[in-house]
Amino acid sequence: MVEKDRRRSLRLQTLVRLRWLAVAGQTATALYVAFGLGFPMPIIPVFALIAALAFGNLVLTIRFPATQRVGPRIAFSLLCFDLMQLTALLYLTGGLANPFAPLISVPVIISFTALPLHHAIALLALAVSGVSALALSPFPLPWHMGLSVELEPVLQFGVWIAIISMLAFAAFYARRISQEAQQISDALAATELVLQREQHLSQLDGLAAAAAHELGTPLATIAVVAKEMERSLAGDSDYGEDVQLLVSQSQRCRDILARLTSLSKDDEAHMRRLPLSSLIEEVAAPHRPFVAEMKIDIAGEPGDEPVGQRNPGILYGLGNIIENAVEHAARTVTVSARYSETQVTITIDDDGIGYTPEILPRIGDPFVSHRQKGESRAGGLGLGLFIAKTLLERSGATLTFENAGGARITVTWPRWRMETGSEG
């Protein structure tokens, strides 16, 4: 709940700048209409309303620092004041006949992008009430002396409908765009965390080698001292066995460090470079116990197998897709790889129910609802698959999703991109 409130908080400076822009626009328009065009208008009430907005904004500027963030309630109160001030100005200057009447939608759009839904709906209701009040305004539109602009009832009703429709459409559209942007932001943040974790795991071999190197010298000293003690206390009934145990355990530690060092030296190239067959085996192996049958099929020119840089994004992405296939397979998951001089393709098939037609265009979107057990593959494709898709696309791959008996995901790289392991 606290996290949601933080996301919905607004920086006060943003609202203050928008309000100063409103003050400048309202002042310039009122001065031009009243003195530039010479149209009659209630000058004192109009400028009093503009002064009220300017004074309130000045108080906010002086009272709070530029970095101050305001919660939903305060932001809602400020937007309500802005909406009522603008509605009053329009009411005094012709109501719905005023060409600036559609500007009443601006506070509503801001609320639907930045405030909780119940606050935004309340502001929308206030805006609808304000538009309805404008239709009843007795004040004429400022115009040439002796002339008046009056809207026919049918035309006035049409303007009212148009503004209400614009309010509803703009509110829905702004809300939808805001939610999608937030979802993408959250999903990308999760992607970065997963990628960081995978990179840390890939660096463990280096850490093991460093630990073996750093511990080797002090452990050698301990072993020398322990052997000296063993020679001195070999016949001691109280400490002889303890000293022998110390010697044996120090030797065991040296053997462990030797294996770590050897593993790092022998497997350094293997850890940094992965043939395609090793890559597939590495990502498939953890999931074999959870499916009745996992088939791996690799085809290409003999002796020309692609050898790529170890890329945590590729390892995690393919692993996630295989895990998803295993979860939804009836019995069999097939991982097929094909390579040529220019292209590398990995296809993951399962013999499950497959994707429903309505879900296919949305696969890879973050936070798609998870399906219930026994349903078709309409769900279970939320943040995990989004992360996998994002990481694989960063490595230069393109992904296609289709039904071929069960579900099929095809991942294709230009060969040079996979072998270099670079991110685009």
Image (tube, rainbow, N blue to C red):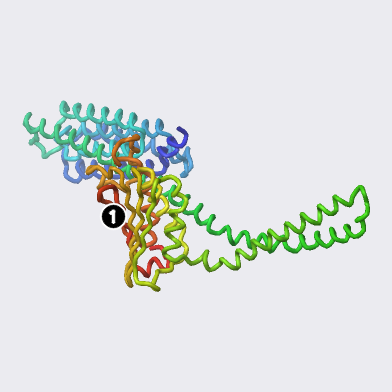
The image quadrant of residue 93 is top left
**Picture residue at 23% right of the left edge, 41% below the top:** 30
The N terminus sits in image quarter? top left
Pointer 1: residues within 10 angstroms few (<14), some, or many (20+)? Answer: few
The image quadrant of residue 315 is bottom left
Above or below: residue 232 compared with residue 170: below
**Residue 216: where, in percent of width, then height?**
73, 63
Name the one closer to the observer, 170 or 41: 170
**Picture residue at 45% right of the left edge, 38% below the top:** 6
Name the one closer to the observer, 128 or 173: 173
**Residue 39: where, in percent of width, then height?**
16, 39
The C terminus sits in image quarter? bottom left
Q: Secondary structure at mark 1?
A: strand
Residue 353 is left or right of residue 166, and the answer is right
Residue 228 is left or right of residue 401, and the answer is right
Above or below: residue 144 compared with residue 217: above
Name the one closer to the observer, 71 or 400: 400
**Residue 110: where, in percent of width, then height?**
31, 39
The image quadrant of residue 79 is top left
**Residue 66: where, in percent of width, then height?**
46, 44
Residue 137 is left or right of residue 65, and the answer is left
Q: Is residue 182 visible?
A: no
Q: Amino acid at mark 1?
A: Thr
Residue to which mark 1 is pinned: 400
Q: Is residue 49 visible?
A: yes
